[in-house]
Image (spheres, rainbow, N blue to C red):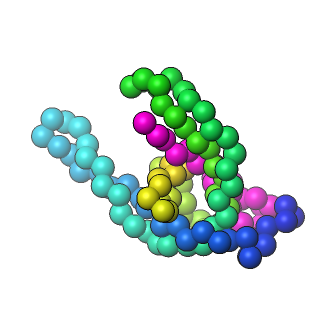
Amino acid sequence: MIGLRIGALRRRLRLEAPSYTSDEGGGAIVAWNPVTTLWAEVIPLSGGEELRADGLQSIAKYEVRIRYRADISPEMRFVFDGRVLEIQAVRDIEGRRRWLSCLCEELGS
Protein backbone atom coordinates (compact mmCIF):
# COMPACT_ATOMS: atom_id res chain seq x y z
CA MET A 1 0.00 0.00 0.00
CA ILE A 2 1.31 3.42 -0.86
CA GLY A 3 -0.39 5.06 2.09
CA LEU A 4 -3.47 6.38 0.27
CA ARG A 5 -6.23 7.20 2.74
CA ILE A 6 -9.79 8.32 2.17
CA GLY A 7 -8.97 11.51 4.13
CA ALA A 8 -6.41 12.47 1.47
CA LEU A 9 -9.20 12.85 -1.12
CA ARG A 10 -9.84 16.55 -0.44
CA ARG A 11 -10.34 18.07 -3.89
CA ARG A 12 -13.68 17.96 -5.67
CA LEU A 13 -13.05 17.39 -9.40
CA ARG A 14 -15.33 17.10 -12.40
CA LEU A 15 -14.48 14.29 -14.81
CA GLU A 16 -15.24 15.14 -18.45
CA ALA A 17 -15.28 13.08 -21.64
CA PRO A 18 -15.01 14.39 -25.20
CA SER A 19 -17.67 14.06 -27.87
CA TYR A 20 -16.84 14.79 -31.47
CA THR A 21 -19.00 16.20 -34.24
CA SER A 22 -17.91 16.75 -37.83
CA ASP A 23 -17.55 20.26 -39.13
CA GLU A 24 -18.02 21.45 -42.73
CA GLY A 25 -14.25 21.52 -43.36
CA GLY A 26 -13.79 17.80 -42.75
CA GLY A 27 -12.46 18.28 -39.22
CA ALA A 28 -14.05 17.71 -35.87
CA ILE A 29 -15.45 19.91 -33.14
CA VAL A 30 -14.81 18.73 -29.60
CA ALA A 31 -17.38 19.27 -26.85
CA TRP A 32 -16.58 18.28 -23.27
CA ASN A 33 -19.40 16.53 -21.42
CA PRO A 34 -19.46 16.04 -17.64
CA VAL A 35 -19.30 12.38 -16.57
CA THR A 36 -19.33 12.78 -12.80
CA THR A 37 -17.84 14.71 -9.90
CA LEU A 38 -15.52 12.92 -7.54
CA TRP A 39 -13.13 13.42 -4.64
CA ALA A 40 -9.40 13.23 -5.38
CA GLU A 41 -5.92 13.86 -4.09
CA VAL A 42 -4.06 16.20 -6.45
CA ILE A 43 -0.26 16.00 -6.15
CA PRO A 44 1.96 18.49 -8.05
CA LEU A 45 4.88 16.68 -9.69
CA SER A 46 6.75 19.17 -11.87
CA GLY A 47 6.46 22.28 -13.96
CA GLY A 48 8.32 23.97 -16.75
CA GLU A 49 8.16 24.99 -20.36
CA GLU A 50 8.20 22.83 -23.46
CA LEU A 51 8.43 23.58 -27.14
CA ARG A 52 5.23 22.40 -28.79
CA ALA A 53 3.92 22.79 -32.33
CA ASP A 54 2.44 26.20 -31.54
CA GLY A 55 5.51 27.52 -29.68
CA LEU A 56 6.76 27.63 -26.12
CA GLN A 57 4.15 26.50 -23.60
CA SER A 58 4.17 26.20 -19.83
CA ILE A 59 3.23 22.78 -18.51
CA ALA A 60 2.52 21.60 -14.99
CA LYS A 61 2.36 17.87 -14.29
CA TYR A 62 0.20 16.31 -11.58
CA GLU A 63 -0.76 12.96 -10.19
CA VAL A 64 -4.46 12.67 -9.43
CA ARG A 65 -5.41 9.79 -7.12
CA ILE A 66 -9.01 8.64 -6.93
CA ARG A 67 -11.06 5.60 -6.00
CA TYR A 68 -10.99 2.97 -8.71
CA ARG A 69 -13.22 3.47 -11.75
CA ALA A 70 -13.13 1.23 -14.81
CA ASP A 71 -14.38 3.95 -17.19
CA ILE A 72 -11.46 6.43 -17.08
CA SER A 73 -9.19 6.76 -20.13
CA PRO A 74 -6.41 9.10 -21.31
CA GLU A 75 -8.76 10.95 -23.66
CA MET A 76 -10.66 12.37 -20.65
CA ARG A 77 -9.85 15.30 -18.37
CA PHE A 78 -10.43 16.65 -14.86
CA VAL A 79 -11.63 20.20 -14.14
CA PHE A 80 -11.41 22.01 -10.79
CA ASP A 81 -11.05 25.61 -9.64
CA GLY A 82 -11.05 26.82 -13.26
CA ARG A 83 -8.13 24.52 -14.12
CA VAL A 84 -8.07 21.74 -16.70
CA LEU A 85 -5.93 18.64 -16.15
CA GLU A 86 -5.61 16.49 -19.27
CA ILE A 87 -5.20 12.80 -18.43
CA GLN A 88 -2.04 11.32 -19.96
CA ALA A 89 -1.96 7.85 -18.32
CA VAL A 90 -4.08 5.81 -15.92
CA ARG A 91 -2.93 2.95 -13.70
CA ASP A 92 -4.41 0.76 -11.00
CA ILE A 93 -2.10 1.60 -8.07
CA GLU A 94 -2.06 -1.80 -6.37
CA GLY A 95 -3.64 -3.95 -9.07
CA ARG A 96 -6.56 -4.59 -6.72
CA ARG A 97 -9.12 -2.17 -8.24
CA ARG A 98 -9.14 0.03 -5.15
CA TRP A 99 -7.25 3.16 -6.26
CA LEU A 100 -6.34 4.80 -9.57
CA SER A 101 -3.41 7.06 -10.29
CA CYS A 102 -3.89 9.43 -13.24
CA LEU A 103 -0.87 11.28 -14.57
CA CYS A 104 -2.09 14.64 -15.89
CA GLU A 105 -0.86 17.82 -17.55
CA GLU A 106 -2.13 21.35 -17.15
CA LEU A 107 -1.23 23.48 -20.15
CA GLY A 108 -0.68 27.20 -19.83
CA SER A 109 -0.03 29.94 -22.36
Q: Residue at x 36, y 63 (%)?
A: 33
Name the main secondary structure of what is drawn in magenta. Answer: strand
The magenta-colored residue range is: 90-109
Q: Is residue 100 magenta?
A: yes
How many circles with numbers are drawn on the protein? 0
Give percent across and percent down for residue 23.
17, 43
Whether residue 19 is situated above or below residue 88 in the rendered picture: below
Return the x and y of residue 51 as percentages of the image width and height.
Answer: 50, 23
Q: Residue 22 vs residue 39: left or right? A: left
Residue 93 lies within the magenta run? yes
Please name the residue shown 58% across and 42% down the image: 60
Q: Nearer the viewer, residue 19 or 44?
A: 44
Q: Is residue 28 above or below residue 12?
A: above
| 14 relative position to 31: left or right | right
Above or below, 12 against 54 in this view is below
Q: Residue 4: image x %, image y %? A: 79, 67
Above or below residue 71? Residue 90 is above
Residue 65 in which image quadrant? bottom right
Q: Quadrant location of the N terminus?
A: bottom right
Residue 2 versus residue 11: which sits nearer the camera?
Answer: 11
Residue 33 shows in the view: yes
Q: Position of residue 107 (x, y in %)?
A: 48, 41
Residue farthest to the bottom?
Answer: 7
Query: Is 86 on the left or on the right of 26, as rendered?
Result: right
From the viewer's perspective, tell me whether residue 1 is left or right of residue 72. Answer: right
Residue plotted at (43% across, 36% down): 109
- The residue lying at 15 percent from left, 35 percent from top is 25
Residue 76 showing in the rendered view: no
